[in-house]
Amino acid sequence: EMWYWVFLWALFSSMFVHGAVGVLMFIMLQRHKQGRLITFILIRAGFLASLTGGVITSAAVAGVYRVAGKDMAPMEALVFGVGQTVLTILISVSRILATL
């Protein structure tokens, strides 16, 4: 049950970020011929990638808590869920992956 709450926070924060970026992309690519299609495809791909990553990392965090025998407070689930989204944004914006 712990992974579920962490995942929900990660999902909602990711939906917020992807929704805001999607609106911005739609506005900026409005005059482009295929701008709406590009916006839809990129938002869908980003959301599915963050959804998959959120499930995996939430299960890993909950597994560590379960092995340690600790309970997770709701505020901890919030911090871990939103933290996943923030770290994903920071890694995406930085050029760390390009140097590998």
Image: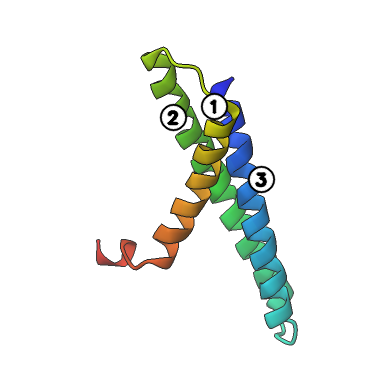
Q: Position of residue 54 (x, y in %)?
A: 52, 40
SS class of the residue under badge 2? helix
Q: Image point 57% across, 33% down: which residue?
A: 75
Residue ID for mark 3? 12
Query: How many other residues sit within 10 Å of disc 2, few (<14), some (14-19) or many (≥20)?
Result: some
Q: Earlier in the sequence, mark 2 or mark 3?
A: 3
How far apart marks 2 and 3 lie (CA) works out to: 18 Å
Residue ID for mark 1? 3
Q: Image point 69% across, 78% down: which residue?
A: 35
Residue 29 in view of the camera: no
How far apart marks 1 and 2 lie (CA) works out to: 7 Å
SS class of the residue under badge 1? helix
Q: Quadrant of residue 92?
A: bottom left
Residue 93, relative to residue 71: is it above or below? below
Apparent side of residue 19 relative to residue 68 in the rendered image (left or right): right
Q: Quadrant of residue 42?
A: bottom right
Amino acid carrying label 3: it is: Phe
Quarter containing the C terminus: bottom left
